Amino acid sequence: ILGSICGGYITGKVQAKRLIGVSYLLIGASFLLVSQSSNFYNSVIFVSLMGFGINLFITCNNSLLLNISGNNNQSLTIAQSYKNALENAGGIVAMVLIML
């Protein structure tokens, strides 16, 4: 939830493209740190950072898609389709990484 709130606040001040890159770095670094952590409390912190990065990504991605879409219903439908495709692709990549 904090990632979404911060993403909504920061997206108005910083370009969403830059925040998407930051969220990818945060997710990736947290994922690697969780895999190397042997302490439960550290794992909780890293998983929380990963959740923050995921919510930051979703918020910035949605605002970026809405900014590039036009004001008619067809372009909003296309933007929603892109959003769904990106989220499903991210889920597939995450499942593949977990299986490795």
Image (cartoon, rainbow, N blue to C red):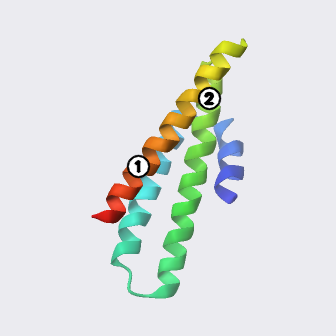
Q: Is residue 90 visible?
A: yes
Query: Picture quarter containing residue 21?
Result: top left
The 10 Å Cα crowd at callout 2, few under 14, some 14 to 19, many 20 or more, is some
Question: How far across and down, in percent of the image, does residue 73 sit?
Answer: 72, 15
**In the rendered view, would you say 37 is above or below 83?**
below
Quadrant assignment for the N terminus: bottom right
Image location of residue 37, percent across then percent down: 38, 80
Q: Which residue is mark 2?
A: 80
Q: Quadrant of the C terminus?
A: bottom left
Disc sitting over residue 74 in the figure: none
Q: Give the residue at x 60% y 39%.
A: 60
Mark 2 secondary-structure assignment: helix
Q: Amino acid at mark 2?
A: Gln
- Asked if residue 70 can be seen in this view, the reply is no
12 relative to 22, above or below: above
Instruction: Work out how far the residue at label 2 is from the one at label 1, CA to CA, in angstroms.
Output: 19 Å
- Residue at x-position 57% and y-position 28%: 81
Q: Which is nearer the eye, 70 or 97?
A: 97
Classify residue 70 by image quadrant.
Answer: top right
SS category of the residue bearing label 1? helix
Figure check: 32 above or below 64: below
Residue ID at (63%, 43%): 59
Residue 58's spot in the image, x, y percent?
59, 44
Asked if residue 97 lies left or right of residue 3, the reply is left
Q: Which residue is mark 1?
A: 92
